[in-house]
Image (cartoon, grey):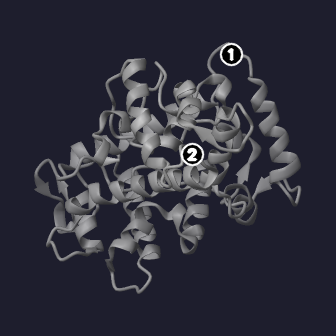
């Protein structure tokens, strides 16, 4: 499942990157980098420690998806992790409590969002007035093709081979932008632009999240999701491949739990229950998980020694390049 999900995201990012290259925009990719189809989480990886600690790494260090990092040796990782632990222990009592770890993970989550907005803000605020108008975003993202402005700026994409895809992306961006623009003046403040980039973080954007989810998974255009579409969004079998056990589990979840009215489809209300099941504090859950796995003397708090003994859970493995925070200076965290 994880491989299929990751492949799909890579294809989406490749497509958006191709758009930016073709239209000659001044930014690398459109700000709306990926669709939002699940409740905001701390990582895009599965939380399955039996297959690695990628989820824990991103939860603890923060998601920095656009970069790759050089690997550090275990010794370097432990040394830099120790410096992070000193920062988490805000009362300097020699222990990391649940509250301190929870606060740190929330801090990293907010930092990821702030850095993502910062990264795009300077590209789209063309007149440097501290706001981003829809026209600024539209023209910067879609308004140029091979260095020349598209005819009439009506976004007909006459010279683009797959113009229907580009028109669809523009329509979707405009709808999301208008939803984020709470006062309807066509200009996004920083908070409104944050809601545009990260709608999963804002309650008033939930209808957009639900609608985008249905549009992405609904292949036959009936505005609802059947079982085949539901599974197809997560898994595409390869030639001769046996169906994984988790697929059967997901089919059961669809029929027994997701499809509450038992009509064979997920409508908007059922999708909302699936992807927005209520207030879930992922940072709180992750803090509890890390303490449970690390606290060997069962005193509900962890020492630096206990953390360093489990350094690979927090910051490192050969598969994940250890995480970006370990390549930053101590004062940058």
Q: Residue furthest top?
A: 240
In the displayed structure, would residue 61 be above or below residue 318? below
Q: State the SS at label 1.
A: loop
Measured as percent of width and height from the top left, residue 88 is found at 48, 48
- Residue 174 figure quarter: bottom left
Q: Residue at x 33, y 80 (%)?
A: 186
Residue corresponding to mark 1: 241
Q: Is residue 146 visible?
A: yes
In the displayed structure, would residue 281 be above or below residue 86? below
- Residue 66 figure quarter: top left
Q: State the SS at label 2.
A: strand
Residue corresponding to mark 2: 96
61 displayed left or right of 264: left
- Residue 184 figure quarter: bottom left
Q: Residue at x 33, y 60 (%)?
A: 117
Image disc number at residue 228: none
Q: Residue furthest left?
A: 147
CA distance for labels 1 and 2: 46 Å
Please identify the quadrant where the N terminus is shown: top right
- Using a 10 Å C-alpha cutoff, classify the residue at mark 1 as few (fewer than 14 neighbours), some (14 to 19) or many (20 or more): few
In the displayed structure, would residue 190 be above or below residue 224? below
- Using a 10 Å C-alpha cutoff, classify the residue at mark 2 as few (fewer than 14 neighbours), some (14 to 19) or many (20 or more): many
Measured as percent of width and height from the top left, residue 35 is found at 49, 52
Q: Is residue 154 visible?
A: no
Q: Residue at x 47, y 75 (%)?
A: 179
Measured as percent of width and height from the top left, residue 144 is found at 17, 56
Q: Which residue is nearer to you in this view: 70 or 221?
A: 70
Q: Residue at x 25, y 75 (%)?
A: 131
């Amino acid at each position: 499942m994880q491989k299929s999900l990751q492949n799909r995201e890579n294809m989406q990012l490749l497509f958006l990157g191709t758009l930016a290259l073709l239209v000659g925009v001044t930014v690398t990719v459109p700000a709306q980098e990926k669709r939002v189809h699940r409740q905001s989480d701390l990582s895009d990886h599965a939380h399955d420690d039996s297959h690695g600690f990628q989820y824990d790494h991103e939860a603890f260090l923060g998601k920095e998806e656009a970069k790759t990092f050089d690997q550090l040796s275990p010794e370097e990782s432990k040394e830099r992790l120790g410096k992070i632990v000193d920062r988490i222990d805000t009362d300097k009592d020699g222990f990391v409590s649940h509250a301190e770890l929870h606060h740190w993970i929330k801090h990293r989550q907010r930092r990821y969002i702030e850095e993502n907005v910062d990264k795009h803000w300077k590209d789209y605020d063309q007149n440097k007035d501290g706001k981003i108008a829809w026209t600024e975003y539209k023209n910067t993202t879609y308004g140029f093709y091979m260095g020349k402005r598209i005819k009439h700026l009506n976004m007909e994409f006459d010279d683009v081979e797959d113009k229907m895809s580009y028109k669809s992306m523009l329509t979707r961006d405009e709808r999301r932008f208008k939803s984020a623009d709470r006062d309807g003046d066509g200009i996004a403040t920083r908070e409104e632009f944050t809601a545009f980039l990260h709608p999963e973080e804002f309650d008033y954007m939930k209808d957009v999240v639900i609608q985008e989810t249905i549009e992405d998974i609904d292949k036959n255009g009936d505005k609802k999701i059947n079982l085949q579409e539901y599974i197809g969004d997560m898994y595409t079998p390869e030639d001769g491949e046996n169906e994984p056990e988790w697929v059967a589990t997901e089919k059961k979840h669809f029929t027994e739990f997701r499809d509450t009215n038992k009509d064979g489809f997920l409508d908007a209300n059922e999708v909302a229950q699936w992807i927005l099941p209520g207030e879930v504090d992922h940072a709180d859950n992750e803090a509890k998980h890390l303490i449970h796995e690390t606290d060997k003397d069962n005193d509900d708090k962890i020492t630096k020694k206990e953390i360093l003994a489990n350094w690979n859970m927090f910051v490192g493995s050969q598969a994940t390049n250890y995480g970006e925070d370990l390549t930053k200076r101590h004062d940058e965290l």
